[in-house]
Image (cartoon, rainbow, N blue to C red):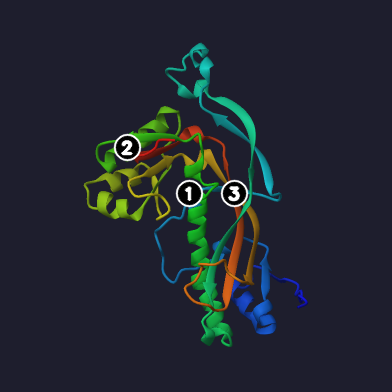
Amino acid sequence: MATIAFPAVEATAAVSPGTAFAAAFAVHGEHTRVSYDYTITDAHKPDRPKPRLTVRGLLKRRPAGQDTISFWCEGGPGPEQAAVTESGLRREAAFQSGVTQARVHPVRAWVQIPGELAGDAGGLASYIDHRLLVRIATAENQALTIGPHGLLRHPEITRLPYRGGYADAILAACDEIEQVGSTAHAIIVNPADYYRGLVGRGSLLADLAANGTLISRTRMIPPGQALAGDFAEAVRLLDAGRSVITVAEPPPGTFARPGLAVCGEVYEGLAVHLPTHLFLAVPSGEPTA
């Protein structure tokens, strides 16, 4: 069977991603592919204010016009640390600088279009804007934390095993950030730990807020762990500024039953300039590397 190629329909931020997709779908149906010249998760507009930060929301951005980016970085001390004057007082004095590379990777999410929406442009637009974009935001959280190129996979972030309470582990990680001359900008925690170990447990949340420490809640960090860091200084989100929504065949196991499937794709990466400013609290007994 010959493959019929349909050119991608260009869309801009002037209309919502769902509106652009629905208009293209009305013409091209199962051959629809819409490209966007921005990262479409930025276009998600919840129906109500949601005081919940995504991992992406913690990071400053660097436009990535190429798939591979070179950037400066600073790693931990080497065996020559003892020769550095005052390295005991200022740990960062013994850090070693260099240049490394990072890549932009596709981040994908899928939804199935209910049959009743196939001929309903307004309903389809709303469905894409409110469900696919949310799924992409979740996929971003996964990619930026536990994904193969995520923060928790970085070999140079420091693991801090703890035996006591979860709150004490968080405070110990915040202390470590300031011991390298930086600021406890934010913490990434699992919602289970946030609601069962932090909310209603004294003044800790208020104290962290007064300290200017942000909290991002995501299922994409294992329960019992907390990643604390000066994310504003340590990490940059590499944002390619382009996205695609396309009707496509999903990988096996994506859905429980057959149906018309739509994939949303954005392109992002991480430049970890200062892994020395990131500390992962882990329960004692878990692997530390």
> 134 above or below 24?
above
Residue type at mark 3 is: Gly
Q: From the viewer's perspective, is 197 left or right of 212?
A: left
For residue 213, which quarter of the picture? Answer: top left
For residue 271, which quarter of the picture? Answer: top right
Q: Earlier in the sequence, mark 3 or mark 1?
A: 1
Q: Residue tagged by mark 2?
A: 285
Quarter of the figure that contains the N terminus:
bottom right
Residue type at mark 2 is: Gly
- Which label is found at residue 145? 1
Closer-to-camera residue (92/28)? 28
Q: Residue tagged by mark 3?
A: 269
Q: Secondary structure at mark 2?
A: loop
Q: From the viewer's perspective, is 259 left or right of 159?
A: right
- Which label is found at residue 45? none
Q: Which residue shows up at 57% across the image and 61% down it?
A: 108
Q: Provide residue 154's location: percent of width, then percent of height.
A: 51, 39
Q: Residues within 10 Å of mark 1 (few under 14, many from 20)?
A: many
Q: Which residue shows up at 67% across the image and 76% down it?
A: 32
Residue type at mark 1 is: Thr
